[in-house]
Image (cartoon, helix red, strand yellow):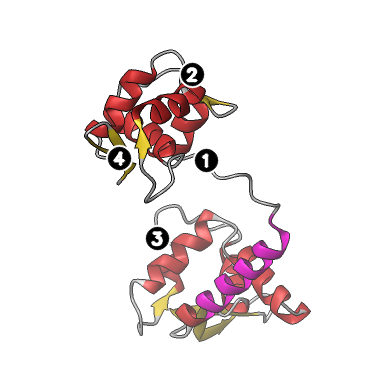
Amino acid sequence: MDNNSLQETLQLLKAFATPMRLAICGYLAARPGQSIQVAELAQIPGVIREGFEKDLRQLSDAGLVTVTEWVNWVNSGERLPAALSINPAYQQIMSAQIAGLQRINKTLAPVTAKPIQDEREKTLSHFFKDGRLLEMPVQLKRQQYILEVIAASFEPDKRYTEREVDALLKTIYPKDHCTLRRNLIDFKLLQRENGIYWKI
């Protein structure tokens, strides 16, 4: 974003810096194509008369509103806005400014923190330590996660005897490798026939 674009963005942010300016802009935006008298704008809830003209100028300077009618102030001869309308191009202005702010945010944003672990990762980190299963979870969904990881220890297309299956499972869960073996079959991760096992 170049310096001019940055200045335009800052001007826009300043224009929206008060609830009163937001209320005025919202009121005009709800009446596109209409020229609204300043006296009517002054009646908007939340609008305070003091500093009102300054707020109108800031909205105009930011390109959000267009002054459709001017009046000369009697005492000073200063020109003041008498009627305004929303700038029909304000949506494009806003889109361009928002895109610019997003680019700034990307360049200034700190390195994002590690994403929150999903349920599978949480389950695995909670129930496994150093490749060993600490205990079997009660919930079926968590059991599925655990058993899928254990099933990955078996080579595809290789046939295993029950003794080989037990030997492998004992290294993962020595507490109850027999239940683990049955669960792998029940969850359709291992197939068994005539004492021979293989990964599905």
Q: Where's residue 4, x and y in %?
A: 74, 81
Say which amino acid is labelled 1. Answer: Ile
Q: Disc 4 to disc 3, how far (Cα)?
A: 72 Å
Q: Are marks 2 and 3 in contact (CB under 8 Å)?
A: no
In the rendered image, the vertical position of residue 83 relative to residue 51, given as above or below: below
For residue 110, side relative to residue 131 (left or right): right
Residue in the image at 72% along x and 60% along y: 108
Which structural element holds mark 1? loop
Say which amino acid is labelled 4. Answer: Leu
The residue labelled by disc 1 is 116
Q: Which mark is residue 43?
A: 3
Quadrant of the image for the N terminus?
bottom right
Q: Residues within 10 Å of mark 4 (few under 14, many from 20)?
A: some
Q: Nearer the viewer, residue 25 or 67?
A: 25
Decide if residue 73 is in sight here. Answer: no
Say which amino acid is labelled 3. Answer: Gln
The residue labelled by disc 4 is 189
Q: Is residue 164 magenta?
A: no
Q: Are marks 4 and 3 in contact (CB under 8 Å)?
A: no
Q: Main secondary structure of the magenta part?
A: helix
Q: Disc 3 to disc 1, how far (Cα)?
A: 49 Å
